[in-house]
């Protein structure tokens, strides 16, 4: 700031075209990049350790049974961790804030409402005859259509404050849940039993037949997100600046919302709704990543998501012998983070 | 270069921009002045395709901004809006590097870094390059955003109140640099400015707007006249000639007359 400038002589400026000798500025990898790399390596290492502990600790009986059994569960946790983390980061980028998540905005409540409506209209007996994978496909298609239409309208219309969006999300979530529970009152108690499993997050009672189709879908969705990563960086600047830099905001947001809808469906179908987990993981990832670039933030968030689930489950299940408590603990911590972010955001 | 044909933008029942016709030639610095709510910023946003038009057409370099490909337009026209809220935590250098996106699509080349370095130098931001934007003052942030827009290296540069939050020294420096970009590099710069005297001193062309329409346009001598400004702003304005340039004063008599002079 102390440098005196002589405005009339600095004119050649940044605006001329670029055939000049290469500058000494910023060509070596910045320390931030190296830091991001180390963070990823560290998280990857920790994840390997946690996974190994999860697979082997306290195993009784034949390895031929234990390994595939635990392996499927590990894979399911990995899918959920990646789906929740990536969908949250994507959603926060397109909504230009760090507080809203798909679950806070009622995405997974919508998915549960769809499930309930299906049981309500078709009946669980007939549903049971349908292949779980096909069912999942139908739910997914409806989810993507409705979810994207609704949230695209909500998010890309007039500029709305975060607080209005939080309120809208809470109202939508309550609406979807109330509709679900209304239908559940009307249906047969036996069919209610079928639904109840879906209504509460549990990492122990997931549908094993869904794991592989879910893995395939997740791979495609994450692949699309990865392909968009540089455009997503620009979206961080907000709608107008992104448009000015030549990004088609509406189309990109629409595409990202499709990816988010698929990811939320994957995780909700596998383990049920988890409200604040994504918020926890995404905000931790922003802190740790040391870069705003999605090429760094997305992998860091995904690693963190899987690590939190696998390590948490290993510790609770094997060390403390609790069973379903992980979801509760995650919600507790995530809820606190949500409140802190909301209060801090208010002050700015 | 910029042709605005009967542009209309409405919010509810209010026609914020109401059938504006405007033709700006390539090269030159144009200032849009006018009272609050005259539709200046909205017009600028329409030209930059940041808002959808409700009627009319804008051509930049022969391209219709509402139908041309956004990424093509981004290499011809760069725009800065007023607000500088950012959810992400970025350094000045990160932000300015985003200006290269239309050319690099995110794969930054040494040539891009060269542009970034020059933009930082151009706006006196080198000492601040690695500071985070949320740790800087309003004026410093403002300069960082202008640096990003200049880094985009386009023919047409649209700036909505680039002097916001700037102290007189940086305001003068900013205007001198924009002037240099016009004179030496042949850029077409369009600004929304509040300070009439800044417009009078630096512009080739001034457009005075009120109530969503262009009231008067022309050279500073044609627009900076007491009767024109008084009717545009609804306030008695005197104009004095200082060093061959028109200079407006608009503070009511009865107090020590304060003249805000930039030169």
Image (cartoon, coloured by chain):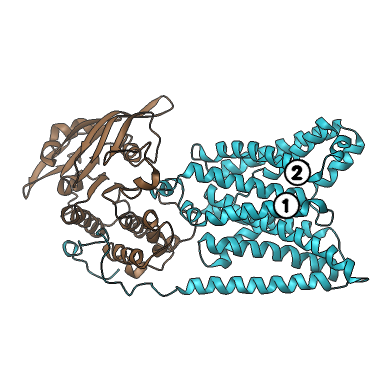
Chain colours: A cyan, B brown
- A3 sits left or right of A77 in the view: left
Nearest the eye: A231 or B120: A231
**Element at badge 2?**
helix
- A64 sits left or right of B83 in the view: right
What residue is drawn where x is 34% and y is 42%?
A: B48
Circle 2 residue: A136
Depicted A13 relative to depicted A168: above or below? below
Tally of numbered tags: 2
Tag 2–tag 1 contact (CB < 8 Å) = yes
Q: Chain of mark 2?
A: A
Q: Give the mark nearest the N terminus, 2 or 1.
A: 2
What residue is drawn where x is 75% and y is 68%?
A: A311
Q: Position of residue A242 (x, y in %)?
A: 43, 49
What residue is drawn where x is 80% and y is 57%?
A: A203
Residues tagged by mark 2 and mark 1 found on one chain of the structure: yes
Depicted A133 relative to depicted B217: above or below? below
Farthest right residue in view: A61
Circle 1 residue: A214
């Amino acid at each position: 700031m102390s440098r005196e400038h002589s405005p009339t002589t600095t004119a050649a400026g940044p605006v001329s075209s670029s055939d000049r000798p290469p500058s000494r500025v910023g060509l070596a990898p910045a320390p931030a990049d190296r830091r991001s790399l180390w963070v990823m390596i560290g998280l990857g290492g920790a994840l390997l350790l946690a996974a190994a502990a999860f697979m082997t600790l306290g195993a009784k009986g034949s390895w031929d049974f234990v390994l595939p059994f635990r392996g499927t569960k590990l894979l399911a946790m990995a899918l959920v961790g990646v789906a929740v983390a990536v969908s949250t980061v994507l959603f926060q980028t397109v909504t230009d804030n760090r507080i809203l998540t798909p679950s806070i905005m009622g995405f997974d409540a919508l998915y549960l409402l769809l499930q309930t409506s299906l049981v309500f209209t078709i009946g669980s007996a007939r549903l049971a005859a349908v292949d779980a994978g096909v069912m999942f496909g139908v739910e997914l298609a409806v989810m993507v259509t409705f979810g994207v239409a609704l949230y695209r309208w909500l998010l890309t219309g007039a500029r709305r404050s975060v607080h209005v969006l939080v309120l809208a999300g809470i109202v939508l979530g309550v609406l979807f849940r109330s509709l679900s529970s209304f239908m559940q009152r009307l249906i047969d108690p036996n069919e209610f039993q079928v639904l109840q499993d879906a209504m509460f997050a549990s990492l122990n009672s997931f549908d094993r037949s869904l794991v592989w189709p879910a893995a395939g879908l997740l791979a495609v969705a994450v692949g699309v997100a990865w392909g968009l990563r540089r455009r997503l960086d620009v979206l961080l600047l907000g709608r107008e600046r992104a448009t000015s830099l030549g990004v088609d905001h509406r189309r990109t947001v629409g595409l990202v919302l499709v990816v988010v809808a698929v990811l939320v469906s994957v995780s909700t179908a596998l383990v049920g709704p988890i409200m604040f987990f994504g918020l926890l993981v995404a905000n931790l990832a922003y802190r740790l990543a040391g870069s705003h670039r999605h090429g760094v933030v997305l992998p860091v968030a995904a690693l963190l998501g899987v690590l939190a689930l696998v390590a948490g489950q290993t510790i609770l299940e094997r060390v403390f012998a609790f069973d379903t408590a992980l979801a509760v603990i995650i919600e507790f911590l995530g809820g606190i983070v949500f409140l802190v972010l909301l209060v801090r955001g208010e002050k700015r | 270069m910029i042709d605005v044909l009967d542009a209309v933008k409405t919010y509810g029942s209010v026609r914020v921009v109401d059938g504006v016709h405007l033709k700006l030639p390539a090269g030159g610095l144009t200032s849009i002045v006018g009272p609050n709510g005259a539709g200046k910023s909205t017009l600028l946003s329409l030209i930059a395709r940041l808002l959808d038009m409700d009627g009319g057409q804008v051509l930049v370099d022969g391209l219709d901004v509402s139908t041309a490909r956004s990424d093509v337009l981004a290499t011809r026209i760069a725009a800065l809006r007023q607000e500088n809220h950012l959810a992400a935590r970025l350094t000045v250098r990160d932000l300015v590097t985003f200006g290269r996106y239309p050319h690099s699509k995110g794969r930054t080349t040494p040539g891009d870094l060269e542009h970034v370095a020059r933009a930082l130098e151009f706006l006196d931001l080198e000492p601040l390059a690695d500071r985070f934007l949320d740790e800087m003052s309003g004026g410093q942030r403002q300069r960082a955003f202008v640096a990003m827009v200049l880094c985009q290296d386009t023919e047409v540069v649209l700036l909505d109140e680039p002097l916001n939050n700037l102290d007189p020294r940086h305001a003068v420096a900013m205007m001198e640099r924009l002037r240099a970009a016009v004179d030496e590099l042949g850029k077409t710069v369009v600004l929304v400015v509040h300070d009439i005297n800044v417009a009078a001193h630096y512009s080739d062309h001034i457009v005075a707007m009120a109530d969503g329409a262009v009231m008067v346009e022309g050279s500073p001598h044609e627009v900076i006249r007491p009767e024109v400004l008084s009717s545009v702003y609804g306030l008695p304005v005197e104009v004095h000639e200082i060093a061959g340039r028109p200079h407006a004063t608009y503070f009511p008599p009865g107090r020590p007359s304060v003249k805000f002079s930039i030169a």
